[in-house]
Amino acid sequence: MRAVVVGPEGEAALAEVPEPEGPGDLFRVVACGLCGSDVEKLDAAHAGVVLGHEVVGEAADGRRVALVHHTPCGACERCRAGHETTCKRFAAPTIRPGGFAERVRADGWVELPEEWPAWRGTMVEPLACVLRGVQRVPQGRVLIVGNGFVGRLVGAVLERRDSEVFAVDTDPRRAGRAPDGPVDAAVLCGQGGVETALETLAPGGTLLVFADAGRIPAEDVYRRELTAVGSRSATPAAMQEAVALLDELEVPEPTVLPLERFVDGLSLFRGRDALKVVFTP
């Protein structure tokens, strides 16, 4: 079958790979979204890997589902404390080989409404990540630093719960309403931006690290008594919650391309000419 494989120097290329075997149910991939974390893995260390985890699959009986990217055990101390993504079991892949392929095997999924276009289903996984993360953000005035696709999802969820949302981005095409004063919380949704977030946070504010945004000066946290928290990935429960909520949010429609145009889509994403790119085999 066809799949996009990471090459020896980190390049992405369409290639023929073996059919997925082993445990899990077999799904035909209908669509798969490109995530920033996929782009970060385009390097020599991931040579031979098929990436892609924002996957809509079609089961043998015709049902469309969003595949679960990772699964915690649900019983260990970390899971019971609400830190499921740090569970030792969580790192094990549950979509094999990866969503940028024609078929995959998967261990978990959530059903999607029949009327949804395939691209909408790819938004379930990133929205689930957002829902889990914003649980740590207090209601009030919130600044989003990095207003790409995920930043827009964060803003949509926060506005739905009546927070006053501001958004800044290094790309003026993506910047939203700039803050008119100190904010109660800031959410880091892209690389860099730590300085902007810290400058805007009121003393005692909360900083949610939702992306690898760089080093956070400890002195700022200490002297201004800030609360810095992190959140990564999603859980099956959050995926189910995302399916129920997605229709109530205004989300940007992505650029949809066939899998053979992966390099073109990657260029659009890297050049920030597309807010979101989804591929269809």
Image: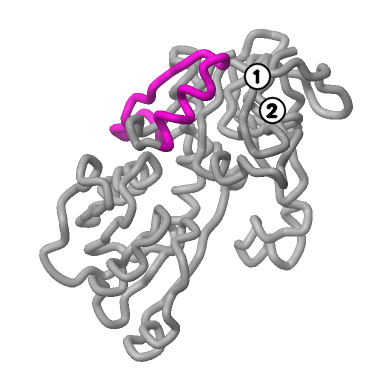
The residue lying at 34 percent from left, 25 percent from top is: 253
Badge 2, how many Cα within 10 Å: few under 14, some, many 20+?
A: many
The answer to whether marks 1 and 2 mark residues whose Cβ atoms lie closer than 8 Å is yes
Residue 125 position in % (x across, y down): 53, 37
Residue furthest to the bottom in view is 223
Q: Quadrant of residue 144?
A: bottom left
Task: Give x and y (percent) for residue 109.
Answer: 65, 30
Q: Does the magenta stretch include residue 251?
A: yes
Q: Residue at x 37, y 39 (%)?
A: 149
- Closer-to-camera residue (176/43): 43
Residue 170 horizontal/vertical position (percent): 27, 52
* Quarter of the figure with the C terminus: top right
| Above or below, comparing residue 12 to residue 143 in the picture | above
Q: Mark 1 points at which residue?
A: 14
Mark toward the start of the polypeptide (1 vs 2): 2
Vertical order, 7 against 183 (above or below): above
Q: Give the range drawn in magenta.
A: 245-270
- Left or right, 118 with respect to 28, comes to left
Q: Which dot marks residue 5?
A: 2
User: What amino acid is found at the position of numbered circle 2 in the picture?
Assistant: Val
Looking at the figure, which quarter contains the N terminus?
Answer: top right
Of residues 70 and 236, the one nearer the viewer is 70
Q: Quadrant of residue 59?
A: top right
